[in-house]
Image (spheres, rainbow, N blue to C red):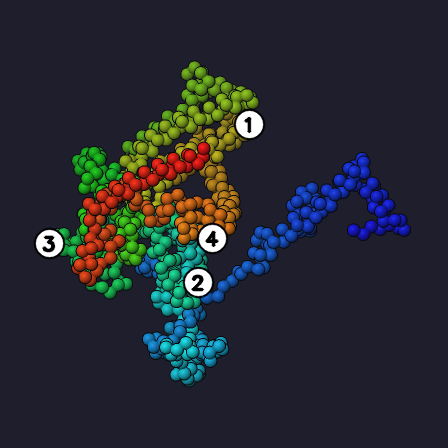
């Protein structure tokens, strides 16, 4: 440290500086404070935030130089761009397979794959070289192998008819190399992207593993946007209102096979979080599936064959068609038989067909019939053989409608069970066939929502109005009961009582109690209003009512949406409470101060069908604003929190000894999840799913025991259930005895 001395001795000058500038009474205190100041200055070199008292701008420590998004690592050293990638807007295409992605031809010509020549592909590759980079399929470059130890020479193929002769010359000079010699390397052709290639698709933000999945490519001519089926939308959290996605074309056969087997759409059918399916049909397809499988839905031969052909339009194998349900006077097939034909033709022919007993999402109360003479609702039908009871035997849909519970993103539905019994390829194929057949059926049937679907009957509307009239005066009775006032208390007296309570700081608990009692009284009336109108009071019943069909089948919407349209919006709440009063005792300027009526406390008695008035609209927008702010705030906070969690957990892995360890080999768990079970493979290991496993024991046997050509070898592998049960009991006894020994040893060790 250099000190200006002005001719004085440096020690004397330092002593004078310490005495004059450093705080402290004695020299020891001053030296101690100077030492602390020096240490603080040294700390600031590493971390500016170490000295929180120093607010001077412009100083940056070593930590600030490195950390966060603007630091040296993430801003300058880590890569931001990659080759062999594309990005465009996504559009829906229900006729693509679930695991397919439509790539525009413009992208397909630019994205190339290095194809090493061999005896099987050399003639096809020569043709691609002749076509050049402008035509699809074609080639953009060739790599001519040189002598051993020297890098290959890359040649760019020029486009246009004037260079046809050059490309033909290059094509004739290509050779596959000698497969029996390591000294002869084959030439490589960088061909364009083709149908059947594998690409990684990604939609940002990449919040979980299924945000990046592998798809099969289908090249689209005269298109500019990427195309995708509806089923993977939930995995990517994608919709088609302008979303964009990235595609990455991996550059060797090993990576292609990893995409197909490890990162493919079928391999990500179940979420790693809890083992629930993340691929499923949505919206229109759910509605179409319910309409097709309703009891009484029939198709003639032309329409039936059209539906089956549309479902299997991507496949070339022979199809088995079930016999018609009705033969005279005309051959007719039921809608359930369309599903039967798809199930039986998708499942492998060498394995037993699926058996399934389950429930539809559509509740049993939706199938109530009306008396044809009086119009009154009849009793709820029994569950057995109803449309809510889904029964499949040997691949035949015998009873029930198929809705979101069976081909949506729900556990233990038809597609989930097919995935467990036959594997991901069969599940993807069946889901793709359902997507196409439901789209085609909707073109036959049509579906729209009209005003008649949200109108209520005159009787229900009169009941609704009378209940709202009673509700308007319930505020007075709640206040009278809360403050033990007589029933003939005047309105002004009630307002005065409320004003004195709200303005007194000691009566906060009383204010909360009044607010709670008011909400309870309003909820009772709201429930009566809702039950009078929806769904029993609607003019149209399910399934003729399009809105109720969407809600009950799980396609879109909820009962709350239907109630707000046809009945009333109900009580508006802000942060779990009714809208707060201002200092003048009003929730809005148009109400009287300390008005006890529910409408002044944020109850919207009008509905969207007939419109809401200005005061109610203001309450409604207050609740909407709260939702918007919550969404905006939570996005940034949850994003940062997830990044922190990922960075701390990314070094954890399961090792070969089944232990879970960190990057420094420190043990976190002796066995993953304490039981060593994969979440995605243990969803059916519950007591509720054992009946399904018993019904499909033959299919499970085929799944786990391989087939042999020699009958003697197959005889040794037959599954003897009684022997299996004996071994299971012996293992259970051994485990119990072993666990007891471990517990005794552990207790002894603790002592």
Tell me where residue 484 appears, x and y as whole percent: 44, 16
Above-or-below relation of 409 to 162: above
Q: Earlier in the sequence, mark 1 or mark 3?
A: 3
Q: Is 670 left or right of 390, judged from the image as shown?
A: right
Q: Earlier in the sequence, mark 4 or mark 1?
A: 4
Q: Secondary structure at mark 3?
A: loop
**How far apart in space, not on screen, are marks 4 and 1 (Cα)?**
47 Å
Q: Secondary structure at mark 4?
A: loop
Residue identified by numbered label 2: 248
Above-or-below relation of 75 to 468: below
- Give neighbour class at mark 3: few <14, some 14-19, many 20+ (Cα, 10 Å): few
* Residue 466: quarter of image: top left
**How far apart in space, not on screen, are marks 4 and 3 (Cα)?**
55 Å
**Outermost residue, right side:** 7
The numbered mark at residue 205 is 4
Q: Earlier in the sequence, mark 3 or mark 2?
A: 2
**How far apart in space, not on screen, are marks 3 and 2 (Cα)?**
54 Å
Tell me where residue 440 appears, x and y as whole percent: 27, 57
Q: Is residue 574 visible?
A: yes
**How far apart in space, not on screen, are marks 4 and 2 (Cα)?**
16 Å
Q: Earlier in the sequence, mark 4 or mark 3?
A: 4
- Give neighbour class at mark 4: few <14, some 14-19, many 20+ (Cα, 10 Å): few
Residue identified by numbered label 1: 584
Q: Earlier in the sequence, mark 2 or mark 1?
A: 2
Identify the residue at horizontal 26%, vertical 63% (top origin). 315
* Residue 546: quarter of image: top left
Q: Work out whether residue 571 or residue 734 is closer to the camera in this orientation and state it.
A: 734
Q: Is 121 left or right of 647, judged from the image as shown?
A: left
């Amino acid at each position: 440290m250099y000190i200006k001395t002005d001719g004085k001795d440096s020690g004397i000058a330092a002593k004078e500086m310490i005495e004059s500038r450093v705080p402290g009474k004695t020299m020891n205190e001053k030296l101690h404070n100077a030492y602390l100041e020096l240490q603080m200055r040294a700390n600031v070199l590493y971390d500016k935030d170490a000295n929180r008292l120093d607010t001077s701008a412009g100083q940056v420590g070593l930590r600030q130089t490195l950390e966060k998004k603007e630091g040296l690592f993430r801003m300058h050293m880590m890569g931001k761009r990659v080759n062999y990638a594309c990005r465009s807007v996504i559009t829906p295409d229900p006729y693509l397979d679930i695991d397919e992605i439509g790539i525009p031809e413009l992208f397909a010509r630019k994205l190339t794959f290095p194809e090493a020549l061999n005896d099987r592909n050399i003639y096809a590759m020569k043709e691609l070289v002749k076509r050049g980079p402008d035509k699809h399929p074609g080639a953009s470059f060739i790599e001519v192998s040189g002598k051993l130890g020297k890098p290959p020479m890359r040649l760019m193929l020029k486009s246009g008819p004037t260079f046809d002769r050059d490309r033909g010359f290059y094509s004739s000079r290509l050779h596959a190399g000698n497969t029996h010699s390591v000294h002869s390397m084959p030439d490589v052709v960088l061909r364009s992207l083709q149908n059947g290639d594998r690409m990684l698709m990604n939609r940002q933000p990449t919040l979980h593993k299924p945000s990046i999945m592998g798809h099969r490519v289908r090249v689209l001519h005269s298109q500019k946007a990427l195309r995708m089926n509806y089923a993977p939308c939930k995995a990517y959290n994608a919709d088609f209102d302008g979303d964009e996605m990235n595609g990455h074309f991996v550059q060797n056969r090993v990576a292609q096979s990893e995409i197909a087997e490890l990162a493919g759409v079928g391999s990500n059918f179940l979420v790693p979080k809890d083992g629930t399916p993340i691929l499923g049909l949505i919206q229109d397809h759910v509605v179409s599936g319910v309409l097709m499988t309703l009891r009484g839905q029939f198709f003639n031969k032309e329409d039936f064959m059209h539906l089956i052909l549309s479902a299997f339009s991507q496949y070339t194998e022979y199809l088995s068609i079930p016999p018609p349900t009705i033969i005279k006077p005309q051959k007719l097939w039921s809608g359930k038989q369309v599903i039967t034909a798809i199930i039986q033709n998708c499942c492998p022919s060498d394995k037993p067909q699926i058996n399934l007993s389950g429930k539809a999402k559509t509740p049993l109360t939706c199938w109530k019939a009306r008396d044809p003479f009086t119009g009154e609702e009849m009793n709820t039908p029994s569950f057995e053989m109803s449309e809510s009871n889904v029964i499949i035997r040997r691949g035949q849909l015998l009873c029930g409608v198929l809705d979101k519970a069976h081909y949506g993103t729900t556990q233990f539905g038809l597609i989930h069970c097919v995935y467990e019994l036959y594997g991901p390829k069969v599940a993807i194929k069946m889901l793709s066939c359902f997507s196409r057949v439901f789209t085609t059926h909707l073109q036959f049937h049509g579906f729209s929502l009209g005003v008649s679907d949200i109108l209520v009957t005159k009787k229900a509307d009169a009941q609704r109005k009378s209940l709202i009239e009673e509700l308007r005066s319930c505020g007075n009775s709640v206040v009278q009961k809360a403050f033990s006032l007589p029933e003939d208390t005047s309105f002004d007296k009630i307002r005065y009582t409320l004003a004195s309570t709200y303005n007194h700081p000691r009566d906060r608990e009383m204010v909360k109690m009044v607010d709670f009692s008011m909400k309870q009284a309003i909820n009772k009336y709201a429930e009566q209003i809702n039950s009078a109108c929806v769904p029993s009071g609607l003019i149209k019943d399910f399934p003729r009512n399009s809105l109720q069909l969407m809600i009950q089948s799980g396609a879109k919407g909820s009962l709350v949406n239907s109630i707000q349209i046809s009945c009333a919006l109900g009580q508006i709440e802000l942060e779990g409470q009714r809208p707060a009063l201002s200092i003048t005792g009003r929730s809005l300027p148009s109400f009287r101060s300390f008005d006890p009526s529910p409408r002044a406390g944020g109850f919207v008695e009008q509905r969207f069908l007939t419109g809401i008035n200005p005061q109610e609209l203001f309450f409604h927008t207050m609740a909407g604003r709260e939702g918007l702010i919550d969404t905006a705030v939570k996005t940034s906070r949850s994003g940062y929190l997830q990044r922190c969690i990922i960075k701390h957990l990314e070094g954890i892995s399961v090792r070969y000894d089944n232990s879970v360890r960190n990057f420094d080999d420190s043990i976190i768990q002796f066995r993953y999840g304490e039981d060593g079970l994969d979440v995605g493979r243990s969803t059916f290991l519950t007591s509720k799913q054992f009946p399904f496993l018993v019904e499909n024991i033959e299919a499970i046997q085929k799944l786990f025991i391989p087939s042999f050509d020699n009958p003697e070898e197959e005889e040794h592998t037959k599954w003897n259930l009684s022997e299996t049960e004996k071994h299971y009991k012996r293992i259970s006894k051994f485990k119990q005895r072993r666990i007891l020994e471990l517990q005794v040893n552990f207790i002894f060790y603790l002592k």
